[in-house]
Image: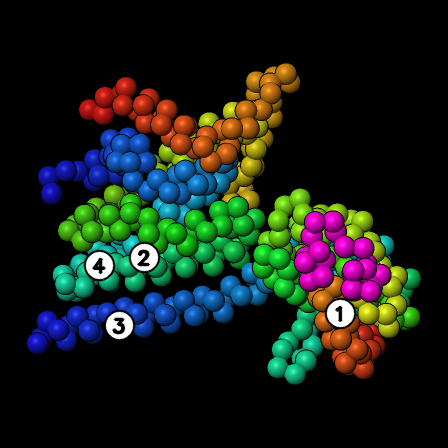
Amino acid sequence: MAKSLVAEFTKGLWKEVPPFRLVLGLCPTLGVTTSMKNGIGMGLATTFVLVCSNILVALLRKVIPSKVRIACFIIIIATFVIVVEQLMQAYAYTLFIDLGVFIPLIVVNCIVLGRAEAFASKNGVVFSTADGLGIGIGYTCALAVLGAIRELLGTGGLKGDVFGLLPYSFPNLFGASFEPFGFAVQAPGAFVALGLMLCAMNLIPSK
Amino acid sequence: MGEMIKMVVVLTVLSVISGGGLSWLKDFTAPKIENQVMNLVKGPAIRQMLKDADNDPVADRFKIQDGDVERTIFVGVFGEKPDTVVIESSANGFADKVGLVVAINMANDTLRGMAVTTSKETPGLGARAKDDPAFAAQFAGKPLTIPVKVTQDGGTINALSGATITSRGVCVGVTKAIETYNHLKPQLEEKIKSMGK
């Protein structure tokens, strides 16, 4: 492993930011980004699962027989997803209601399984943690940006909190005469917003 | 052969650890989740229904054993007298189960109110059972002796137009709650007396 720890961490933030560069994990990306609050919540939940499963997979990589590795990864990932689901119900119930089915669906998020298979099963614990954190934070930022764009256009302001903490509220950023663009927070708006984001990301070269 | 055994052992051990951990977590979070549901799903409906009560009905709740099921009962205090109990119930609606809470005045055996807590009914039609206060208001003040039915079935409740099935479901749910109340009444009275309010 010639790459440094910092490089493993930062690649997820820009060079390999999952929804925009790798175009992975799009189902929740499209589904939950109706507001910045939901985007951040979903991103953090995924980050938690990603980091925990990366650590465990890296720890057990020498023990797990290669023929059943996928089954083992799925047990590990599913366990952490249920942990997140239960904790979210216990401590952030409204967010859990907003995110709905997308929380259990983290199990099949290809980013999580992808990192376990492609990275954590071949690298040590420290590198895997850095990789999971980087990709997870990158994913959270991507969802937050997409959610913020859609919420801004759809409601004219930003309002919410992060797991009940850090409340923020910026109503009517475009002035009182702004007519909310309801299309942006509906399902088709997600596709258009994601398309425009992909387009913008491709205009900026990745290297 | 050795590899085979290793596969089985690794998978088994992983599953056991994961299953055990999760069942511990479930026990750990269950009371917290119940509190959240009480406060955010049932709480607003119950507080709205008993908005003139002198206490917080959600805080003054107890559990009672009814055959095999454990029921949560909420108590409303009116004029220093805890005379109102709220019983949870559910019935089949148009799309899925409709969950509701029914408040019963124990002093004169009348309904004090009804509110839908959870429903997946059609927005604008069946969902009005939850959203339209006029529909829910019809239940208040009805004596328990009159069967709760929609007018089409010979009852006294005006069904929501375009949502007869939901309205019937709600009536069935209320009837179920009344049945529960009738056979639990002695236990309820005793329990409320022992609350010392």
Q: Residue A24 carries which label?
A: none
Of badges 3 and 4, nearer the viewer stands 4
* Chain ID, mark 1: B
Q: Position of residue A103 (x, y in %)?
A: 43, 51
Residue that mark 1 sits on: B175
> What is the CA distance from the residue labelled 1 to the residue labelled 4?
52 Å
> What is the CA distance from the residue labelled 3 to the residue labelled 4?
15 Å
Lower position in the chain sequence, tag 2 or tag 4: 4
Q: In which quarter of the image is the C terminus of chain A?
A: top left
Badge 3 amino acid = Val
CB of mark 2 within 8 Å of CB of mark 3? no
Residue that mark 3 sits on: B13
| Residue drawn at (38%, 68%) of the image | B21
Residue that mark 2 sits on: A77
Of badges 1 and 4, nearer the viewer stands 1
Of badges 1 and 2, nearer the viewer stands 1
Q: Position of residue B89 (x, y in %)?
A: 68, 67
Of badges 1 and 3, nearer the viewer stands 1
Residue that mark 4 sits on: A70
Badge 2 amino acid = Ile
The answer to whether tags 1 and 2 share a subunit is no
Question: Can residue A170 be seen by looking at this rendering?
Answer: no
| Residue drawn at (56%, 60%) of the image | B33
Bounds of the magenta span? B149-170
> What is the CA distance from the residue labelled 1 to the residue labelled 3?
50 Å
| Residue drawn at (71%, 66%) of the image | B173
